[in-house]
């Protein structure tokens, strides 16, 4: 039973990681590809916290923008990283401790944003970092205080009977 549960969880993690990588790095962004990296970074990056979030909320509240784009961006950035709250502690029991988990998740999400910038497969947006971390923390909180926690007896770094 333990081996079966591990296989199911690992398979779902691989599927999740594949989908996440596809969303983050394999969407078409062709018109920026010939621009020098410095210019691309200058025009496509947001380093002002809450600028994008407040802009979307403001545009929604006064009707300047269709609801689809801001909702997809705001909610999507949160939902995309919620599964990390389950998978990372499952893969490594040290990540079941809140402080360690937070440090690792912040580093992973920051690295993703930098890689998106360097590969020109996205933009560097500090608000994406904020929203992704909120999602990862929500996932961690849900898995830390619900019956789902019982699945952690099948952790990868524990010996299987």
Image (spheres, rainbow, N blue to C red):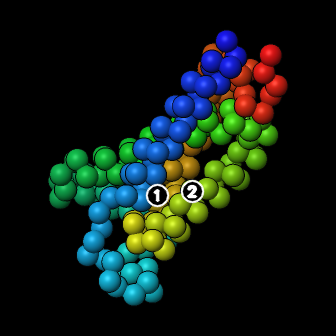
Residue pointed to by mark 2: 109
State yes or no: discs 2 and 1 in contact (Cβ < 8 Å).
yes
Residue 60: x %, y % from top left: 24, 52
Total number of numbered labels?
2
Mark 2 crowd level (few <14, some 14–19, many ≥20, 10 Å Cα) = some
Task: Answer above or below: position of 146 versus 58.
Answer: above
Structural distance between the alpha carbons of marks 2 and 1: 9 Å
Residue at x 22% of width, y 47% of height: 67
Earlier residue among tags 2 and 1? 2
In the shown orientation, is residue 108 left or right of residue 116?
right
Residue at x 42% of width, y 59% of height: 25
In the shown orientation, is residue 159 left or right of residue 136?
right
| Quadrant in which the C terminus appears | top right
Secondary structure type for disc 2: helix
Residue pointed to by mark 1: 128
Q: Which tag is nearer the camera, tag 2 or tag 1?
A: 2
| Quadrant in which the N terminus appears | top right
């Amino acid at each position: 039973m333990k081996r079966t549960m591990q296989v199911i969880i690992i398979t779902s993690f691989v599927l999740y990681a594949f989908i996440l990588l596809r969303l983050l790095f394999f969407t078409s962004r062709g018109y920026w590809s010939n621009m020098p990296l410095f210019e691309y970074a200058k025009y496509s990056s947001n380093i002002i916290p809450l600028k994008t979030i407040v802009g979307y909320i403001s545009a929604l509240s006064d009707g300047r923008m269709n609801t689809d784009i801001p909702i997809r961006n705001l909610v999507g950035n949160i939902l995309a990283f919620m599964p990390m709250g389950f998978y990372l502690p499952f893969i490594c029991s040290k990540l079941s401790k809140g402080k360690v988990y937070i440090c690792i998740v912040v580093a992973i999400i920051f690295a993703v944003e930098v890689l998106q910038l360097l590969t020109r497969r996205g933009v560097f947006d500090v608000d994406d970092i904020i929203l992704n971390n909120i999602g990862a923390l929500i996932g961690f909180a849900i898995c830390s205080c619900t019956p789902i926690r019982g699945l952690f007896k099948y952790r990868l770094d524990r010996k299987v009977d």
